[in-house]
Image: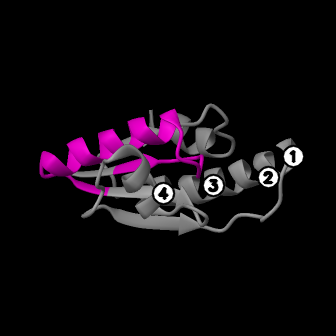
Amino acid sequence: MKALVYWALSGIGGVQRFDALLTRALLDLGIETSILVPSSFNPGDVENYHGVKIKGAHIIKYGIIDCGGAYCDLVNNVQGNIVLANIISNGNYDLVFIDTLFLYPASKVLIKKM
């Protein structure tokens, strides 16, 4: 079984703790797990801050714009969702967990698969 966990945010707050714990649990169950993260993501920061090691997960990074503000975050989220849509359209994963509410254009792929 293969799982993909989409971490839309690159920080180390509460959502990332949940994502790290979910990733660790999937790995501990023997499930081949990949995580899709922004290029600014540093797994060492998450491990140091939350104490959850995600060693063994395949990390897939997508490029983001290095800027600040709500519009920049929106553009980066769209970029991540485009990459997510491309990855899940291949049908290589049995389980996909998405931690974002803004799914366009990935939502088009998900709806077609349902």
Counting residues from the start of the chain, the first of labels 2 and 3 encountered is 2
For the record, the magenta segment spans 4-33
The foreground one among 96 and 74 is 74
Q: Earlier in the sequence, mark 4 or mark 2?
A: 4
> Magenta stretch containing residue 112, yes or no?
no
Could one spot residue 91 in this view of the protein?
A: no
Circle 3: residue type: Gly
Residue contact at pointers 1 and 3, CB within 8 angstroms:
no
In the rendered view, does 3 fall on the left or right side of 17? left
The residue at which mark 3 appears reads as 80
Q: Earlier in the sequence, mark 1 or mark 3?
A: 1
- Dot 1 lies on which element? helix
From the image, tell me which residue sits under label 2: 75
Residue type beneath disc 2: Val
Check contact, mark 2 vs mark 3: CB within 8 A: no
Are dots 2 and 1 in contact, CB under 8 Å? Answer: yes
Q: CA distance from mark 3 to mark 4?
A: 8 Å
Say whether disc 1 or disc 4 marks the residue closer to the N-terminus. 4
What residue appears at the point 67 percent right and 35 percent down from the top-left corner?
A: 102
Occupied quadrant, residue 17: top left
Q: How far apart are labels 1 and 4 at the CA level?
A: 21 Å
Question: Which residue shows up at 78% across the image and 45% down it?
Answer: 74
Give me the C-alpha separation between circle 1 and circle 3. Answer: 14 Å
